[in-house]
Each structure stands twice: as structure tokens, then as C-alpha cells.
Image: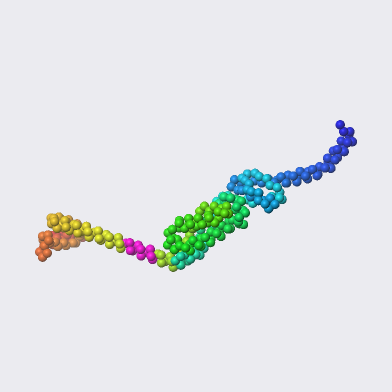
Amino acid sequence: MLPYPYIGLYFLGIEEMLPGIIFLVIILLIFLAMSIKIVREYERAVIFRLGRLLGAKGPGLFFIIPFVDNFIKVDLRVTTVDVPEQQIITKDNVTVGVDAVVYYRVFDPVLAVTRVENYHYAVMMMAQTTLRDIIGQVELDDLLSRREEINKRLQAILDEVTDPWGIKVTAVTLKQVRLPESMLRAMARQAEAERWRRAKIIEAEGEKQASIILGEAAKIYEQHPAALRLRELQTLLEIAKEKNLIIISPSTLGAETSLLGTAIALSRKTSGSGGSGE
């Protein structure tokens, strides 16, 4: 057991060293806080040590050496690129404005960081140039009617180009195709003319079918004259329902010169008399 004077000197030495110890603890805590890093489930951290690639870490907790290691976060979720409207001349020399949307995701964060400087900007520029190339090879009618096929072609080309960057293009969609005003008016006239053509064809087909049916009916009436007379009487009965109508009918069926001299007058006076005469 130390004598009293030595105990006092011991505590005095600790008190003199206490600020240094506290400073050292604070430095260690700061160093530890700078060493601990956390990335989310959909993120990866690409770590470099003195400029050399160490690899990708995450998700969760990992450690780095402060002032020696640095890292870049890479998002693995699907990202949307809005390709601005491009003025493109189609194969049949029509200027159209086309914009699109590209959906992609990073499947290899190391390649996405080391192979291309800014992969998001690179994908957008590649989408613009590829869109111009593809639209310039198709005609306007194909652009309007075969958009799904064009989307798949764009996706295949972009996916092949961006695969070495560690990027997967999942979909490409043409948003809108803007046509010149003069082209819109011409297409409207073309559509109207097409509708008129179809209407005329349908009307002619109806006339053709009706003539065939009437020819067959005429043959039946020729074989059965009584049927034709019954049809005539039925027609007279139907038209006799009209007011102020005079009907002149042949006296016998098929007569050309002999007519029935009797006129049937179906007249109903609306003034209140209510009489009718034959």
C-alpha cells in the first residue's frame, strides 16, 4: 500500500493526463464513427483503397479505413430515363417528333462504376442516338401501327450496348409520335375517303344480294300466280291505311291494257264528318 504522499502524487498525475485521455477517446470515437457505414437493401457500396478496387459491399453494415478508403453508392432499383422529344425524318421523308421512356437497372455495381463515368447520362445519350437510328429506318405507317415491334428492337439494341457496363435495359416505350399539321389533315382526308369507299362497297353488296333474292322470288311467283295475287292484295291492304289516297289496280293479274275502272278512295275527313267512299 502506497504512503499517503505517493497516493496524492498518483492522483495528481492522473488528473494531469486526463485531458489527453479524453482527447484520445474522442479521436477514437470519431475514427470509429467514420469507419462504420451502412447501405440499404437496394444499394451497394463499391470500395476503393488508395485508388485500387476492393469490391462491392452491402447491404447492411460494413467498415472502411477513414482517409484511406472511399466508396460510391450504387442504386440497384429500376431507374427511369425520360428521353426528350427528337425531330426525326422517317424512311418515307416525313418529319416526326418522337419521345420515349427507358427503364433499366444495375446488375453489376462494380462494372457500372469502373466501365463508364456516368452510367445514367450514358444510357440517356445512347437511347437518343438509337431512337434516331431506328425511327429513320421505318416508314410512317409502320411507326404508327408497329410500335410494339419498334419498342422491342430499341430494347434489344440498348441492352446489348449497356451489358458491358453492368446495366440491364428492361423496357423501352415510345411515349408519343407528333405529326405535322399538314400530315394530320391529309390522314384525316384519307380516313374519310376510306370510310366512304367501304360504305359504297357495302351498299353495292346489299344491292347484289337483294337482286339475287328478288330473282328467286320472281321465279316462284311465275310458277305460282296465285301467290303473286295474294302479295298484291297484301300490298293494297298496307297502303290503304294512308289517308286521302286513291288506288288504281288492274282488274286481273297480269293484265296490261285492261284496268279496273273502279277507284278505291280511302278518305277520312279530319274535320269531324268521318265519312269514307269507294
Report the residue at 79% width, 43% height from top: 21
Q: How many marks?
A: 0
Report the residue at 16% width, 62% height from top: 246
Report the residue at 59% width, 56% height from top: 119
- Residue 52 placed where, x, y %? 67, 52
Q: Tell me if residue 2 comes above or below residue 144 in the rendering.
A: above
Dominant SS of magenta comes to helix
In-front residue for pair 215/46: 46
Verify whether residue 197 appears in magenta.
yes
Q: Tell me if residue 248 comes above or below residue 76 in the rendering.
A: below
In-front residue for pair 46/262: 46
Report the residue at 55% width, 51% height from top: 105
- Residue 162 placed where, x, y %? 55, 55
Q: Residue furthest top?
A: 1
- Residue 229 placed where, x, y %? 14, 57
| Quadrant of res 254 | bottom left
Verify whether residue 40 appears in magenta.
no
Looking at the figure, which quarter contains the N terminus? top right
Name the colour scheme: rainbow
69 sits left or right of 272 in the view: right
33 sits left or right of 244 in the view: right
| Quadrant of res 198 | bottom left
| Quadrant of res 26 | top right
Is residue 180 visible from the viewing direction of this image? no
- Residue 86 placed where, x, y %? 52, 63
Q: Start and end of the magenta stretch?
A: 189-199
Is residue 145 visible from the viewing direction of this image? yes
In-front residue for pair 132/263: 132
Looking at the figure, which quarter contains the C terminus? bottom left
